[in-house]
């Protein structure tokens, strides 16, 4: 399929074209980038929701429950699961883990998982791209599951208009140590596994954390859910709708969209810069020599890093002259 066929296919609701385009975007091919550039103007209709939180918090189960609730409301759902490839989940089939068989046989649902290992900062770029493809393919709701651990995963949240942070009871230490960055990217907090003891304590802790966070006009609600039984999920979907109204229809809509666009552009620029700088540095052979010096303590890491960047800048400048 050429890019025309991909673009037309996606807009026409062709699943095969969509799947192909997603593979291109994941692999960051020229065709993938072209399709995204051409489709971007056709996006912005879907409710793009990021579901993040630590490993095992129940994100996948919650994604399944949200998808079912959205289907009840007559909305189609695209799901992107960024698989952490952790030792726990390695080799597991996503559909099995989420017990999503009912969803995978539903025409109104499209499920896709992406690997996060070895993606050199390109993960947020890829996840954002895949969310845009699903949006252009007319899915009403796009759900992105990601483990909220590293910078990369936090940035995946940038793909979403609404990010839901999933915490657990008894995760007190975890809540305490939760990165400020993660608190700030989440617009809704959910204490999942509320069937276990300590849910109210976890909610109190989240409330305390929020009270010291630097909040804008949107105050994140803190909800309780039992993803396994879908208890609290209708309320969660209501809260998501409310946040979507806030970013679309309120007096703050323009500012929210601008902030979101800024986060996306910066995250992608950072990923590209990272990739290109490392590739230039590797090609110049400068890294190995500098690393050796630092390992031998004949040079400090900071000055080695500066020297490396100097090499990259020189290389780019001379490439620029050659062009
Ligand atoms: N008690 C209880 N267990 C739950 C609930 N939701 C999920 N679980 C269980 O928690 C475990 C992890 O659930 P997942 O949905 O795979 O969690 P996850 O956050 O997607 O996990 P990773 O993707 O591996 O980080 C599973 O055994 C679930 O059955 C809940 O509401 N209550
Ligand atoms: Mg999961």
Image: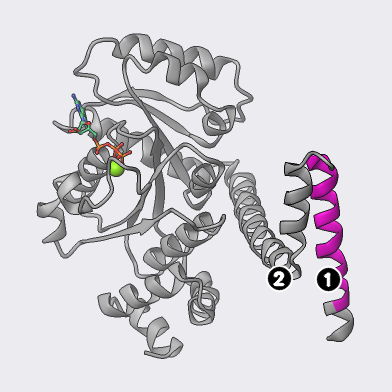
Left or right of 295? Residue 173 is: left
Q: Name the residue under label 2.
A: 283
Q: Disc 2 or disc 1, which is closer to the eye?
A: 2
Q: Horizontal and vertical percent for residue 256?
A: 59, 44
Q: Does the magenta stretch include residue 308?
A: yes
Q: Which of 182 and 134 is in front in this view?
A: 182
Q: Horizontal and vertical percent for residue 30?
A: 54, 80
* Label 1 CB sits under 8 Å from any ligand 1 atom: no
In this view, 106 is above or below 72: below
* Label 2 CB sits under 8 Å from any ligand 1 atom: no
Q: Horizontal and vertical percent for residue 287?
A: 73, 58
Left or right of 296? Residue 189 is: left
Q: Mark 1 points at which residue?
A: 315
Pointers 2 and 1 in contact (C-beta within 8 Å): yes
Span of residues in magenta: 300-318
Residue at 54%, 37% in the rendered image: 185
Total labels drawn: 2
Left or right of 274? Residue 70 is: left
Residue 3 quadrant: bottom left
């Amino acid at each position: 399929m050429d890019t025309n066929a991909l673009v037309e296919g996606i807009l026409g609701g062709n699943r095969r074209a969509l799947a192909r385009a997603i593979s291109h975007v994941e692999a960051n091919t020229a065709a993938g980038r072209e399709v995204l550039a051409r489709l971007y103007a056709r996006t912005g209709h879907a409710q793009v929701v990021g579901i993040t939180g630590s490993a095992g918090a129940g994100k996948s189960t919650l994604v399944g429950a949200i998808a079912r609730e959205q289907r009840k409301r007559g909305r189609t759902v695209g799901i992107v699961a960024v698989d952490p490839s952790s030792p726990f989940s390695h080799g597991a089939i996503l559909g099995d883990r989420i017990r999503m068989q009912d969803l995978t046989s539903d025409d109104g649902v499209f499920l896709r998982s992406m690997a996060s290992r070895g993606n050199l900062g390109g993960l947020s770029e890829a996840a954002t791209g895949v969310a845009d493809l699903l949006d252009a393919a007319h899915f009403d709701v796009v759900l992105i599951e990601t483990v909220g651990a590293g910078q990369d995963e936090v940035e995946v949240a940038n793909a979403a208009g609404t990010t839901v942070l999933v915490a657990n009871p008894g995760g007190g230490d975890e809540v305490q140590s939760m990165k400020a960055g993660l608190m700030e990217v989440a617009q809704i907090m959910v204490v999942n596994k509320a069937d276990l003891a300590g849910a109210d304590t976890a909610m109190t802790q989240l409330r305390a954390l929020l009270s010291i966070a630097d909040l804008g006009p949107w105050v994140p609600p803190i909800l309780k859910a039992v993803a396994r039984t879908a208890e609290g999920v209708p309320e969660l979907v209501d809260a998501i709708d409310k946040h979507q109204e806030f970013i679309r229809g309120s007096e703050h809509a323009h500012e929210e969209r601008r902030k979101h666009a800024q986060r996306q552009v910066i995250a992608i620029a950072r990923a590209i810069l990272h990739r290109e700088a490392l590739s230039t540095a590797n090609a110049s052979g400068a890294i190995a020599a500098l690393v050796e010096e630092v390992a031998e303590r004949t040079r400090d890491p900071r000055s080695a890093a500066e020297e490396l960047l100097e090499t990259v800048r020189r290389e780019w400048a001379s490439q620029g002259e050659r062009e």
